[in-house]
Amino acid sequence: MKSKPCAVWRIVLPAVAALAWCAGALAQTDARLERARGEIEKRIQASGADVAIAFRTLDGKLEWHVRADEPFHAASTMKVPVMIELFSQVKEGKARLDEPLVVRNEFHSIVDGSAYSLDAADDSENELYKAAGQTRTLEQLCEAMISVSSNLATNLLIEKLGVENIQKTVGALHAEGMNVLRGVEDEKAYEKGLNNTTTARGLEVLLEAIAEGKAVDGEASRQMVEILERQKWNEAIPAGLPPGTAVAHKTGEITKIHHDAAIVYAKRPFVLVILVRGMADSKASAALMADITRALFQAVE
């Protein structure tokens, strides 16, 4: 008499088959990522730029880092930790999103305390300058700081929140590569090399915290994602994605510096940070970042 298959095997065999399929799918994805890496490395070499990349799927199964712990001038990517600190202080009851703040264009250098002001012509947004003497809420200033990258809004928030508090929050999130020393356009500090710096990994950690609902708390993280999704400058990472792909991101750009740091809500969501140094043409650096994004997206989808 033949023995009947054990009931356990009727359960285990399909599970084993499923695991084998998953392993095969992951191996395929790994192979695609390896090919993408080769393409990207050639593209970077041809550009002549210094490029750092931090890439990680939110399921934690795939990641790739290139010069990810090398410091770069942060440019406007330092506005991400300023936003996180704002929501942190709101949760602690130290600030309110609807709290009014007087708009003024006078700040003090970290070098000697001397006063300086921002030039509206050098800012990506200039409507706020016309509101001098009026008030804007902290929420309105945060929106301007992120979506249109207002330097004036940024400096007003940094002065309100405190640089030391911003850096403490960065440390609590273990994003050691991000260093916020000062507000924007402090020329005396710049001349002494006292700049805000970041690493690709540092920004990756901050964006992962937001994506996973761990930056302050779930509700604050959700609100921050919505603000980042309203980013107006979309020539870099978003340009390398299929139309309609939701992207929560922050760019940063000064002379020969161009960055983009994003949470990409693709079918398989991922965080991608690309830091570029040494390209004078911002259209060329944006195209480079779009090409890197496209290759990585195709590798994981």
Image (tube, rainbow, N blue to C red):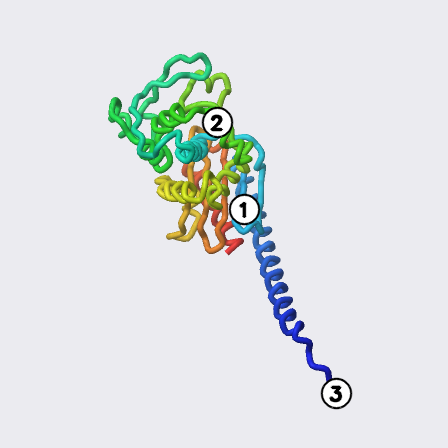
Mark 2 lies on residue? 180
Mark 1 lies on residue? 56
Residue in view at x 53 percent, y 49 percent: 57
Picture quadrant where residue 11 is located: bottom right
User: Can residue 102 be seen in this snapshot?
Assistant: yes
**Residue 296 horizontal/vertical position (percent):** 51, 49
Q: CA distance from mark 1 to mark 3?
A: 55 Å
Residue in view at x 59 percent, y 57 percent: 26
Mark 3 lies on residue? 1
Q: CA distance from mark 2 to mark 1?
A: 24 Å
**Looking at the rendering, in which quadrant would you find the N terminus?**
bottom right
Circle 1 Cα neighbour tier, 10 Å, few/some/many (<14 / 14–19 / ≥20): some
Q: Does the CB distance between marks 3 and 2 fall below 8 Å?
A: no
Residue type at numbered disc 2:
Val
Compared to residue 270, the image places residue 233 above or below, namely above
Picture quadrant where residue 230 is located: top left
User: Can residue 281 be seen in this snapshot?
Assistant: no
- For mark 2, give the secondary structure: loop
Residue type at numbered disc 3:
Met
Q: Does the CB distance between marks 1 and 3 fall below 8 Å?
A: no
Residue type at numbered disc 1:
Arg
Q: CA distance from mark 3 to mark 2?
A: 77 Å
